[in-house]
Image (spheres, rainbow, N blue to C red):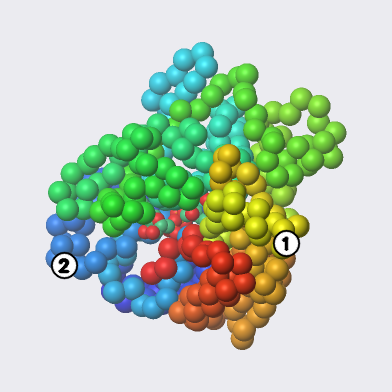
Amino acid sequence: MEKNKSLLKYNTFAIDVDAKYFASFTSFNDLKEIATTKEFINENLLVLGGGSNLLLTKNVDALVLKNDILGIQILKENKSTIDISVGAGENWHEFVMFCVKNNYGGLENLSLIPGNVGAAPMQNIGAYGSEIKDTFLYLEAFNIEKLQLESFTNKDCQFGYRESIFKKELKNKFIILKVVFRLNKTPHQLNTNYGDILKEIELLNIKNPTIKDVSNAVIKIRTRKLPDPKKIGNSGSFFKNPIISKNDFLKLETKYPKIAHYLISENEVKIAAGWLIEKAGWKGKTINNFGVHKNQALVLVNYGGANGSEIHELSNEIIADINLKFNIKLEKEVNII
Ligand SMILES: Cc1cc2nc3c(=O)[nH]c(=O)nc-3n(C[C@H](O)[C@H](O)[C@H](O)COP(=O)(O)OP(=O)(O)OC[C@H]3O[C@@H](n4cnc5c(N)ncnc54)[C@H](O)[C@@H]3O)c2cc1C
């Protein structure tokens, strides 16, 4: 157990704050041992994966628990599917690459999302028309109060758009230790309808794309569009894309015919938060050493040495301004600590 440890290298926003206590674990037994310490019993807890969906606004008055449980295990397979169990501390993208390499389909659209496997169910990570709920079978998690392991099926997790039960009723109550996915064997059902995937594949003149081609296309698009946290501190999309009623959308569309949107049901429309932020004039805005990314208005960035609480303030200003201009209340996707 370490004391007053800098979290600078543990968060992709590159915010330099300290954790009151810090411990990492590589197995369930390790964790059980930590659970007997006075710090685990008396302090608040913050579980950490890759730190790519956090904004640390102050020193963390808690025991920070870094989940480093590794391991990929095939549980069972038949002609068409394979069930794979993955340790929460495995890097998400490396796990996706393992699946692509072995021709297990279903996660290829989620290539290059930063972070670890254990955090993926927290917000039902998604990109390019896929979410982990599409392939998620169950997870095992440690109940912090009862000190026991519990299983959660897909239904139990109550997945929604960047949501799960672990961000709502069960917030801070469980530590996810492993996640089990059911993936597909050939023939794969590719999902190339979303965004620029098909365009990217056509550009490469590929006639019969494989899951590897889809993964490569996603990696190319993401590398082009998103700032690399190794170069500029950020946590990806800072805000969720708001969902509004079709009636409200039609009113907005009269005023803004070019509004970027996506019909999600007969009565609901998802609006591109990045479009709203750009239209409101925030794209590229820089305040001292932080601001809104110049190419991607949905991403707030730390150019080096920024203070998390100032970035948080900026996000609140953006929310208030979007509310004023479009009567839409943006929600934060990033966890504010
Ligand atoms: C450049 C960039 C692009 C991104 N693109 C996407 C995208 O396309 N789609 C998307 O959905 N997300 C995206 N993200 C956000 C982020 O990558 C995901 O949310 C990822 O799942 C976070 O994983 P992590 O291990 O870094 O989680 P952390 O940031 O460490 O933690 C996130 C939250 O989960 C909790 N947590 C972490 N691990 C556990 C555990 N084992 N048990 C219980 N709680 C836990 C933490 O306490 C925290 O509340 C992006 C981020 C960046 C920086």
229 to 115, vertically: above or below: below
Farthest top residue in view? 79
Question: Of the residues shown, which amino acid type is indicated by label 1?
Answer: Tyr
User: Is 116 or 245 nearer to us in this picture?
Assistant: 245
Residue at the image point whose x is 65% and y is 29% from the top: 190
Q: Tell me the number on the disc at residue 1.
A: none
Label 1 Cα neighbours within 10 Å, binned few <14 / some 14-19 / many ≥20 = few
Q: For residue 252, which quarter of the picture?
A: bottom right
Question: Horizontally, is 28 left or right of 336 in the view?
Answer: left
Residue at the image point whose x is 45% and y is 19% from the top: 77
- Residue 307 rendering spot, x and y as whole percentages: 49, 81
User: Is 57 or 51 nearer to us in this picture?
Assistant: 57
> Looking at the image, is mark 1 or mark 2 earlier in the sequence?
2
- Total marks drawn? 2
Q: Tell me the number on the disc at residue 256.
A: 1
Question: Horizontally, is 74 left or right of 28 in the view?
Answer: right
4 to 249, vertically: above or below: below
Residue 293 in sight in this render: no
Residue at the image point whose x is 16% and y is 67% from the top: 42
Instruction: Report helix, strand or loop for mark 1.
Output: loop
User: Closer to us: mark 1 or mark 2?
Assistant: 1
Instruction: Report helix, strand or loop for mark 2.
Output: helix
Question: Of the residues shown, which amino acid type is indicated by label 2?
Answer: Asn
- Residue 95 rendering spot, x and y as whole percentages: 51, 40
According to the image, label 2 marks what residue? 42
